Image (tube, grey):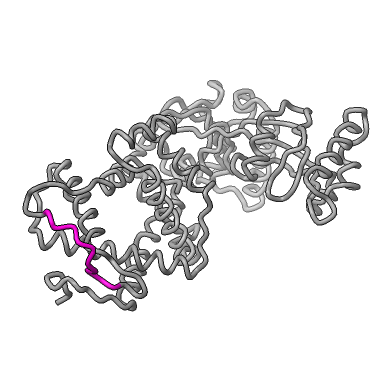
Amino acid sequence: MDRVSRNIFSLMLGAMLIFLSSNSLAIEKLDSIVAVVEDDIILESELAVEVSAIVTKLRANGVQLPPEQVIFKQVLERLIIEKLQSQLAKKAGVNVTDEMVNSSLVTIAKQNGMSMEEFRGELKKEKMDFAAFKENVRKEIVINQLRNHEIGGRIKVSDQEVQHYLDTQLSAEEIKVKYFLGHILIAVPEGASAQAIQTEKVDAHKVIEQLRAGADFKKMAVSVSDDANALEGGELGWRTLNQIPTLFVDVVKKMNKGEISEPIRSPGGFHILKLLDSTGVEQHIITETHVRHILIKTNELINDEEAQKRLAIIEGRVVDGDDFAILAKANSDDPGSAVKGGDLGWVVPGLLVPPFEKAMSELAVNDISDPVQTQFGWHIIQVLERRSKDNSKEHELEQARDEIRQRKIEEETELWLRRLRDESYVDIRLGSLKDE
Protein backbone atom coordinates (compact mmCIF):
# COMPACT_ATOMS: atom_id res chain seq x y z
CA MET A 1 0.00 0.00 0.00
CA ASP A 2 2.52 2.57 -1.23
CA ARG A 3 -0.04 5.38 -1.77
CA VAL A 4 -1.29 5.66 1.81
CA SER A 5 -1.81 9.30 2.79
CA ARG A 6 -2.82 11.34 5.76
CA ASN A 7 -6.38 11.31 4.51
CA ILE A 8 -6.49 7.51 4.60
CA PHE A 9 -4.94 7.62 8.05
CA SER A 10 -7.61 10.04 9.25
CA LEU A 11 -10.37 7.96 7.70
CA MET A 12 -9.10 4.82 9.38
CA LEU A 13 -8.90 6.66 12.69
CA GLY A 14 -12.47 7.79 12.27
CA ALA A 15 -13.63 4.36 11.23
CA MET A 16 -12.53 2.93 14.55
CA LEU A 17 -14.41 5.44 16.74
CA ILE A 18 -17.56 4.13 18.43
CA PHE A 19 -20.58 6.27 17.75
CA LEU A 20 -21.79 7.42 21.18
CA SER A 21 -23.43 10.66 20.14
CA SER A 22 -26.95 11.28 21.41
CA ASN A 23 -28.04 12.99 18.16
CA SER A 24 -30.67 11.62 15.82
CA LEU A 25 -28.14 9.47 13.94
CA ALA A 26 -27.45 7.25 16.97
CA ILE A 27 -28.93 3.78 16.68
CA GLU A 28 -29.27 0.98 19.15
CA LYS A 29 -26.35 -1.41 18.79
CA LEU A 30 -28.06 -4.64 17.85
CA ASP A 31 -26.24 -7.37 15.98
CA SER A 32 -29.10 -7.85 13.59
CA ILE A 33 -28.34 -8.49 9.92
CA VAL A 34 -28.88 -5.46 7.70
CA ALA A 35 -27.66 -7.07 4.45
CA VAL A 36 -26.61 -10.40 2.97
CA VAL A 37 -23.78 -10.05 0.45
CA GLU A 38 -23.20 -13.28 -1.47
CA ASP A 39 -22.04 -15.64 1.32
CA ASP A 40 -21.29 -12.90 3.87
CA ILE A 41 -23.36 -10.56 6.03
CA ILE A 42 -23.29 -6.98 7.29
CA LEU A 43 -24.39 -6.40 10.89
CA GLU A 44 -26.20 -3.36 12.16
CA SER A 45 -23.33 -2.71 14.57
CA GLU A 46 -20.89 -2.61 11.61
CA LEU A 47 -23.11 -0.09 9.89
CA ALA A 48 -23.30 2.05 13.03
CA VAL A 49 -19.51 2.21 13.41
CA GLU A 50 -19.01 3.14 9.77
CA VAL A 51 -21.76 5.79 9.90
CA SER A 52 -20.09 7.33 12.93
CA ALA A 53 -16.80 7.55 11.03
CA ILE A 54 -18.40 9.30 8.07
CA VAL A 55 -20.39 11.72 10.27
CA THR A 56 -17.24 12.59 12.24
CA LYS A 57 -15.29 13.21 9.03
CA LEU A 58 -18.04 15.35 7.47
CA ARG A 59 -18.38 17.49 10.58
CA ALA A 60 -14.60 17.90 10.89
CA ASN A 61 -14.55 19.21 7.32
CA GLY A 62 -17.41 21.60 7.98
CA VAL A 63 -19.75 19.79 5.61
CA GLN A 64 -23.47 20.15 6.16
CA LEU A 65 -24.92 16.70 6.86
CA PRO A 66 -27.38 15.25 4.36
CA PRO A 67 -30.55 13.51 5.63
CA GLU A 68 -30.03 10.53 7.90
CA GLN A 69 -31.50 8.15 5.33
CA VAL A 70 -28.98 9.26 2.69
CA ILE A 71 -25.99 8.71 4.99
CA PHE A 72 -27.10 5.23 6.03
CA LYS A 73 -27.81 4.19 2.43
CA GLN A 74 -24.48 5.49 1.12
CA VAL A 75 -22.50 3.89 3.93
CA LEU A 76 -24.25 0.57 3.51
CA GLU A 77 -23.46 0.61 -0.20
CA ARG A 78 -19.77 1.21 0.59
CA LEU A 79 -19.75 -1.76 2.98
CA ILE A 80 -21.40 -3.96 0.36
CA ILE A 81 -18.72 -3.07 -2.20
CA GLU A 82 -15.96 -3.77 0.34
CA LYS A 83 -17.47 -7.17 1.17
CA LEU A 84 -17.69 -8.12 -2.51
CA GLN A 85 -14.08 -7.15 -3.12
CA SER A 86 -12.88 -9.08 -0.08
CA GLN A 87 -14.73 -12.18 -1.25
CA LEU A 88 -13.34 -11.89 -4.77
CA ALA A 89 -9.81 -11.40 -3.40
CA LYS A 90 -10.15 -14.60 -1.39
CA LYS A 91 -11.29 -16.53 -4.46
CA ALA A 92 -8.42 -15.07 -6.49
CA GLY A 93 -5.93 -16.24 -3.88
CA VAL A 94 -4.70 -12.77 -2.97
CA ASN A 95 -2.23 -13.27 -0.14
CA VAL A 96 -1.04 -10.48 2.16
CA THR A 97 1.76 -11.39 4.54
CA ASP A 98 2.39 -9.91 7.98
CA GLU A 99 5.63 -8.45 6.59
CA MET A 100 3.67 -6.49 3.97
CA VAL A 101 1.24 -5.19 6.60
CA ASN A 102 4.02 -4.20 8.99
CA SER A 103 5.86 -2.41 6.18
CA SER A 104 2.69 -0.45 5.37
CA LEU A 105 2.26 0.49 9.04
CA VAL A 106 5.81 1.83 9.11
CA THR A 107 5.02 3.85 5.96
CA ILE A 108 1.85 5.28 7.52
CA ALA A 109 3.77 6.26 10.66
CA LYS A 110 6.53 7.96 8.62
CA GLN A 111 4.01 9.85 6.49
CA ASN A 112 2.56 11.22 9.70
CA GLY A 113 5.99 12.15 11.05
CA MET A 114 6.08 9.45 13.73
CA SER A 115 8.09 6.43 14.73
CA MET A 116 6.16 3.17 15.17
CA GLU A 117 6.27 3.63 18.93
CA GLU A 118 4.86 7.16 18.62
CA PHE A 119 2.25 5.91 16.17
CA ARG A 120 1.06 3.24 18.60
CA GLY A 121 0.87 5.92 21.27
CA GLU A 122 -1.28 8.11 19.01
CA LEU A 123 -3.66 5.23 18.36
CA LYS A 124 -3.90 4.55 22.08
CA LYS A 125 -4.58 8.24 22.76
CA GLU A 126 -7.44 8.05 20.25
CA LYS A 127 -8.74 4.98 22.13
CA MET A 128 -8.13 2.75 19.16
CA ASP A 129 -7.15 -0.89 19.21
CA PHE A 130 -3.86 -1.42 17.35
CA ALA A 131 -4.81 -4.94 16.23
CA ALA A 132 -8.06 -3.64 14.72
CA PHE A 133 -6.23 -0.82 12.93
CA LYS A 134 -3.71 -3.33 11.59
CA GLU A 135 -6.55 -5.47 10.26
CA ASN A 136 -8.00 -2.45 8.43
CA VAL A 137 -4.60 -1.88 6.81
CA ARG A 138 -4.54 -5.53 5.75
CA LYS A 139 -7.96 -5.17 4.12
CA GLU A 140 -6.80 -2.06 2.27
CA ILE A 141 -3.77 -3.90 0.87
CA VAL A 142 -5.93 -6.85 -0.17
CA ILE A 143 -8.30 -4.58 -2.10
CA ASN A 144 -5.40 -2.75 -3.78
CA GLN A 145 -3.84 -6.04 -4.86
CA LEU A 146 -7.17 -7.31 -6.12
CA ARG A 147 -7.67 -4.22 -8.25
CA ASN A 148 -4.17 -4.53 -9.66
CA HIS A 149 -4.94 -8.16 -10.49
CA GLU A 150 -8.34 -7.51 -12.03
CA ILE A 151 -7.68 -4.17 -13.73
CA GLY A 152 -4.01 -3.23 -13.78
CA GLY A 153 -2.96 -5.86 -16.31
CA ARG A 154 -5.53 -4.63 -18.82
CA ILE A 155 -4.39 -1.01 -18.77
CA LYS A 156 -2.05 -0.03 -21.60
CA VAL A 157 -0.55 3.40 -22.23
CA SER A 158 0.93 4.09 -25.66
CA ASP A 159 3.88 6.35 -26.38
CA GLN A 160 1.55 8.51 -28.47
CA GLU A 161 -0.74 9.02 -25.46
CA VAL A 162 2.22 10.04 -23.30
CA GLN A 163 3.49 12.53 -25.84
CA HIS A 164 0.04 14.02 -26.40
CA TYR A 165 -0.38 14.33 -22.64
CA LEU A 166 2.92 16.19 -22.30
CA ASP A 167 2.17 18.43 -25.25
CA THR A 168 -1.19 19.48 -23.83
CA GLN A 169 -0.62 19.36 -20.08
CA LEU A 170 2.69 21.24 -19.94
CA SER A 171 1.81 24.09 -22.29
CA ALA A 172 0.61 26.36 -19.48
CA GLU A 173 3.95 26.02 -17.66
CA GLU A 174 6.29 26.31 -20.63
CA ILE A 175 6.23 30.10 -20.65
CA LYS A 176 7.95 30.08 -17.22
CA VAL A 177 10.95 28.14 -18.50
CA LYS A 178 14.07 29.85 -19.85
CA TYR A 179 16.69 28.13 -21.98
CA PHE A 180 20.34 29.04 -22.49
CA LEU A 181 21.22 27.83 -25.98
CA GLY A 182 24.31 27.38 -28.06
CA HIS A 183 23.85 27.54 -31.85
CA ILE A 184 25.91 26.56 -34.87
CA LEU A 185 24.76 27.13 -38.45
CA ILE A 186 26.15 25.19 -41.37
CA ALA A 187 24.89 27.44 -44.16
CA VAL A 188 23.50 26.26 -47.47
CA PRO A 189 23.73 28.80 -50.32
CA GLU A 190 20.45 29.90 -51.86
CA GLY A 191 19.63 27.84 -54.92
CA ALA A 192 22.17 25.16 -53.97
CA SER A 193 22.03 21.85 -55.85
CA ALA A 194 20.86 18.65 -54.18
CA GLN A 195 24.47 17.46 -54.11
CA ALA A 196 25.64 20.66 -52.39
CA ILE A 197 22.85 20.36 -49.80
CA GLN A 198 23.83 16.76 -49.11
CA THR A 199 27.48 17.80 -48.68
CA GLU A 200 26.53 20.43 -46.07
CA LYS A 201 24.33 17.88 -44.30
CA VAL A 202 27.26 15.48 -44.05
CA ASP A 203 29.41 18.30 -42.67
CA ALA A 204 26.74 19.08 -40.03
CA HIS A 205 26.70 15.44 -38.90
CA LYS A 206 30.51 15.48 -38.62
CA VAL A 207 30.31 18.55 -36.36
CA ILE A 208 27.68 16.83 -34.20
CA GLU A 209 29.84 13.72 -33.87
CA GLN A 210 32.79 15.81 -32.69
CA LEU A 211 30.64 17.73 -30.21
CA ARG A 212 29.15 14.53 -28.78
CA ALA A 213 32.65 13.12 -28.49
CA GLY A 214 33.59 16.04 -26.23
CA ALA A 215 34.71 18.86 -28.52
CA ASP A 216 34.28 22.35 -27.02
CA PHE A 217 31.08 23.89 -28.34
CA LYS A 218 32.23 27.52 -28.24
CA LYS A 219 35.44 26.72 -30.03
CA MET A 220 33.55 24.72 -32.63
CA ALA A 221 31.07 27.57 -33.15
CA VAL A 222 33.86 30.08 -33.68
CA SER A 223 35.52 27.68 -36.10
CA VAL A 224 32.66 26.46 -38.28
CA SER A 225 29.43 28.37 -37.64
CA ASP A 226 28.12 30.65 -40.35
CA ASP A 227 25.77 32.43 -37.94
CA ALA A 228 26.21 36.05 -36.84
CA ASN A 229 26.84 35.01 -33.23
CA ALA A 230 29.67 32.61 -34.10
CA LEU A 231 32.28 34.90 -32.53
CA GLU A 232 30.33 34.84 -29.24
CA GLY A 233 30.84 31.09 -29.14
CA GLY A 234 27.46 30.50 -30.70
CA GLU A 235 25.61 31.53 -27.53
CA LEU A 236 22.05 32.74 -28.06
CA GLY A 237 21.66 33.75 -24.40
CA TRP A 238 18.67 33.17 -22.12
CA ARG A 239 15.35 32.92 -23.93
CA THR A 240 11.82 31.69 -23.30
CA LEU A 241 10.11 29.50 -25.87
CA ASN A 242 8.37 32.59 -27.21
CA GLN A 243 11.78 34.10 -27.97
CA ILE A 244 13.22 31.01 -29.63
CA PRO A 245 12.77 30.56 -33.40
CA THR A 246 9.65 28.49 -34.02
CA LEU A 247 11.74 26.00 -35.95
CA PHE A 248 13.67 25.17 -32.75
CA VAL A 249 10.84 25.06 -30.19
CA ASP A 250 9.77 21.41 -30.45
CA VAL A 251 13.41 20.28 -30.39
CA VAL A 252 14.42 22.44 -27.42
CA LYS A 253 11.45 21.30 -25.29
CA LYS A 254 12.68 17.71 -25.51
CA MET A 255 16.36 18.37 -24.79
CA ASN A 256 18.24 17.66 -21.56
CA LYS A 257 20.99 19.92 -20.29
CA GLY A 258 24.22 19.35 -22.23
CA GLU A 259 22.47 17.55 -25.07
CA ILE A 260 23.38 18.18 -28.74
CA SER A 261 20.50 18.21 -31.22
CA GLU A 262 20.28 16.49 -34.57
CA PRO A 263 20.64 18.87 -37.56
CA ILE A 264 17.58 21.10 -38.00
CA ARG A 265 16.96 21.97 -41.65
CA SER A 266 15.89 25.47 -42.66
CA PRO A 267 16.10 27.44 -45.92
CA GLY A 268 19.33 28.92 -44.59
CA GLY A 269 21.08 25.63 -43.89
CA PHE A 270 21.50 23.14 -41.03
CA HIS A 271 21.27 24.31 -37.41
CA ILE A 272 22.88 22.54 -34.46
CA LEU A 273 21.72 23.34 -30.92
CA LYS A 274 23.17 22.63 -27.50
CA LEU A 275 21.13 23.16 -24.33
CA LEU A 276 23.73 24.82 -22.12
CA ASP A 277 21.40 25.41 -19.18
CA SER A 278 17.77 26.01 -18.22
CA THR A 279 15.77 27.50 -15.36
CA GLY A 280 12.31 26.55 -14.25
CA VAL A 281 12.94 22.95 -15.27
CA GLU A 282 13.25 20.45 -12.44
CA GLN A 283 16.23 18.19 -12.95
CA HIS A 284 16.04 14.59 -11.88
CA ILE A 285 19.57 13.33 -11.31
CA ILE A 286 20.04 9.61 -10.73
CA THR A 287 23.10 7.53 -9.95
CA GLU A 288 23.70 4.59 -12.27
CA THR A 289 25.84 1.71 -11.04
CA HIS A 290 27.86 -0.76 -13.10
CA VAL A 291 27.69 -3.95 -11.04
CA ARG A 292 28.41 -7.66 -11.22
CA HIS A 293 27.57 -10.55 -8.94
CA ILE A 294 27.87 -14.26 -8.27
CA LEU A 295 24.71 -16.12 -7.23
CA ILE A 296 24.43 -19.39 -5.32
CA LYS A 297 20.89 -20.76 -5.18
CA THR A 298 19.68 -22.87 -2.28
CA ASN A 299 18.01 -26.25 -2.83
CA GLU A 300 17.69 -29.70 -1.26
CA LEU A 301 21.47 -30.12 -1.31
CA ILE A 302 22.61 -26.56 -0.60
CA ASN A 303 21.15 -24.78 2.42
CA ASP A 304 21.70 -21.16 3.48
CA GLU A 305 24.78 -22.00 5.51
CA GLU A 306 26.41 -23.93 2.67
CA ALA A 307 25.63 -21.16 0.14
CA GLN A 308 27.22 -18.53 2.37
CA LYS A 309 30.25 -20.75 2.93
CA ARG A 310 30.79 -21.22 -0.81
CA LEU A 311 30.51 -17.50 -1.49
CA ALA A 312 32.90 -16.68 1.35
CA ILE A 313 35.49 -18.96 -0.27
CA ILE A 314 34.93 -17.33 -3.68
CA GLU A 315 35.18 -13.87 -2.14
CA GLY A 316 38.47 -14.85 -0.53
CA ARG A 317 39.85 -16.03 -3.86
CA VAL A 318 38.93 -12.70 -5.49
CA VAL A 319 40.64 -10.80 -2.68
CA ASP A 320 43.71 -12.98 -3.22
CA GLY A 321 43.81 -11.97 -6.88
CA ASP A 322 41.67 -14.47 -8.79
CA ASP A 323 39.58 -13.05 -11.62
CA PHE A 324 35.98 -12.31 -10.57
CA ALA A 325 34.63 -12.87 -14.08
CA ILE A 326 36.22 -16.31 -14.41
CA LEU A 327 34.89 -17.35 -11.00
CA ALA A 328 31.42 -16.08 -11.94
CA LYS A 329 31.38 -18.11 -15.15
CA ALA A 330 32.37 -21.23 -13.22
CA ASN A 331 30.22 -20.83 -10.11
CA SER A 332 27.26 -18.45 -10.56
CA ASP A 333 23.75 -19.90 -10.73
CA ASP A 334 22.52 -16.88 -12.67
CA PRO A 335 22.82 -18.10 -16.28
CA GLY A 336 22.04 -14.72 -17.81
CA SER A 337 24.94 -12.92 -16.17
CA ALA A 338 27.32 -15.85 -15.61
CA VAL A 339 28.24 -16.00 -19.30
CA LYS A 340 29.21 -12.32 -19.02
CA GLY A 341 31.38 -12.85 -15.97
CA GLY A 342 28.55 -11.93 -13.61
CA ASP A 343 28.14 -8.51 -15.25
CA LEU A 344 24.67 -6.96 -14.83
CA GLY A 345 25.63 -3.84 -16.76
CA TRP A 346 24.57 -0.33 -15.77
CA VAL A 347 21.56 -0.38 -13.45
CA VAL A 348 19.31 2.45 -12.28
CA PRO A 349 17.70 2.85 -8.83
CA GLY A 350 14.69 0.60 -8.35
CA LEU A 351 15.68 -1.94 -11.01
CA LEU A 352 17.03 -4.60 -8.64
CA VAL A 353 15.42 -6.22 -5.61
CA PRO A 354 15.74 -4.14 -2.39
CA PRO A 355 18.26 -6.31 -0.42
CA PHE A 356 20.60 -6.45 -3.43
CA GLU A 357 20.25 -2.72 -4.15
CA LYS A 358 20.81 -1.79 -0.50
CA ALA A 359 24.04 -3.80 -0.32
CA MET A 360 25.18 -2.46 -3.70
CA SER A 361 24.57 1.17 -2.71
CA GLU A 362 26.72 0.77 0.41
CA LEU A 363 29.75 -0.50 -1.53
CA ALA A 364 32.60 1.68 -2.70
CA VAL A 365 33.81 1.22 -6.28
CA ASN A 366 35.72 -2.10 -6.65
CA ASP A 367 34.66 -3.32 -3.19
CA ILE A 368 33.03 -6.75 -2.80
CA SER A 369 30.13 -7.38 -0.46
CA ASP A 370 29.74 -10.11 2.09
CA PRO A 371 27.11 -12.72 1.08
CA VAL A 372 23.69 -11.06 0.63
CA GLN A 373 20.40 -12.96 0.64
CA THR A 374 17.50 -12.23 -1.71
CA GLN A 375 14.54 -14.30 -2.85
CA PHE A 376 16.80 -15.70 -5.61
CA GLY A 377 19.47 -17.04 -3.28
CA TRP A 378 22.78 -15.72 -1.94
CA HIS A 379 25.00 -13.23 -3.78
CA ILE A 380 28.36 -11.54 -3.54
CA ILE A 381 28.36 -8.18 -5.29
CA GLN A 382 31.06 -5.99 -6.77
CA VAL A 383 30.58 -2.38 -7.91
CA LEU A 384 32.71 -1.55 -10.95
CA GLU A 385 31.72 2.06 -11.70
CA ARG A 386 29.22 4.78 -10.79
CA ARG A 387 28.00 7.77 -12.76
CA SER A 388 25.41 10.52 -12.40
CA LYS A 389 22.84 11.01 -15.12
CA ASP A 390 20.25 13.69 -15.76
CA ASN A 391 17.17 11.51 -16.00
CA SER A 392 14.76 14.46 -16.22
CA LYS A 393 13.26 13.60 -19.60
CA GLU A 394 12.81 9.92 -18.79
CA HIS A 395 11.42 10.88 -15.37
CA GLU A 396 8.96 13.27 -16.99
CA LEU A 397 7.83 10.59 -19.43
CA GLU A 398 7.39 8.03 -16.65
CA GLN A 399 5.45 10.52 -14.54
CA ALA A 400 3.18 11.27 -17.47
CA ARG A 401 2.73 7.57 -18.22
CA ASP A 402 1.91 6.88 -14.56
CA GLU A 403 -0.60 9.73 -14.41
CA ILE A 404 -2.34 8.49 -17.57
CA ARG A 405 -2.33 4.94 -16.22
CA GLN A 406 -3.80 6.02 -12.88
CA ARG A 407 -6.52 7.99 -14.65
CA LYS A 408 -7.40 4.96 -16.77
CA ILE A 409 -7.39 2.70 -13.72
CA GLU A 410 -9.77 5.03 -11.90
CA GLU A 411 -12.13 5.07 -14.86
CA GLU A 412 -11.98 1.29 -15.29
CA THR A 413 -12.31 0.66 -11.55
CA GLU A 414 -15.57 2.59 -11.42
CA LEU A 415 -17.02 0.44 -14.21
CA TRP A 416 -15.63 -2.75 -12.69
CA LEU A 417 -17.09 -2.06 -9.26
CA ARG A 418 -20.51 -1.26 -10.73
CA ARG A 419 -20.41 -4.46 -12.76
CA LEU A 420 -19.36 -6.43 -9.67
CA ARG A 421 -22.23 -4.96 -7.68
CA ASP A 422 -24.81 -5.58 -10.40
CA GLU A 423 -23.78 -9.18 -10.96
CA SER A 424 -23.65 -10.17 -7.26
CA TYR A 425 -26.36 -11.41 -4.91
CA VAL A 426 -27.21 -8.68 -2.38
CA ASP A 427 -30.24 -8.80 -0.07
CA ILE A 428 -30.78 -5.64 2.00
CA ARG A 429 -32.73 -6.59 5.12
CA LEU A 430 -33.10 -3.13 6.65
CA GLY A 431 -36.46 -2.13 5.19
CA SER A 432 -35.86 1.61 5.01
CA LEU A 433 -32.65 1.06 2.99
CA LYS A 434 -33.97 -1.43 0.43
CA ASP A 435 -33.26 -0.63 -3.20
CA GLU A 436 -36.17 1.03 -4.88
User: Is 327 left, or right, of 254 in this rendering?
Assistant: right
Q: Nearer the viewer, residue 29 or 233?
A: 29
Q: Which residues are magenta?
A: 26-36
Q: Residue at x 31, y 46 (%)?
A: 12
Quarter of the rendering occupied by the C terminus: bottom left
Along the viewing direction, whichever of 377 and 299 lies nearer the viewer: 299
Q: Is residue 419 above or below residue 74?
A: below
Rendering coords of residue 290 (x, y %): 72, 37
Of all residues, the one furthest to the front in this rendering is 30
- Label count reads 0
Side of 422 where 225 appears, left or right: right
Residue 366 x, y percent position in the rendering: 78, 28
Asked whether 30 falls inside the magenta stretch, the response is: yes
Q: Determine whether 360 is above or below 375 in the image.
A: above
In this picture, residue 9 sits left or right of residue 271? left
Outermost residue on the top side: it is: 232
Q: Residue 380's x, y, as percent?
A: 78, 38
Who's the residue at 63% across and 23% down the image? 219
| Residue 29, x across and y down, in percent | 18, 57
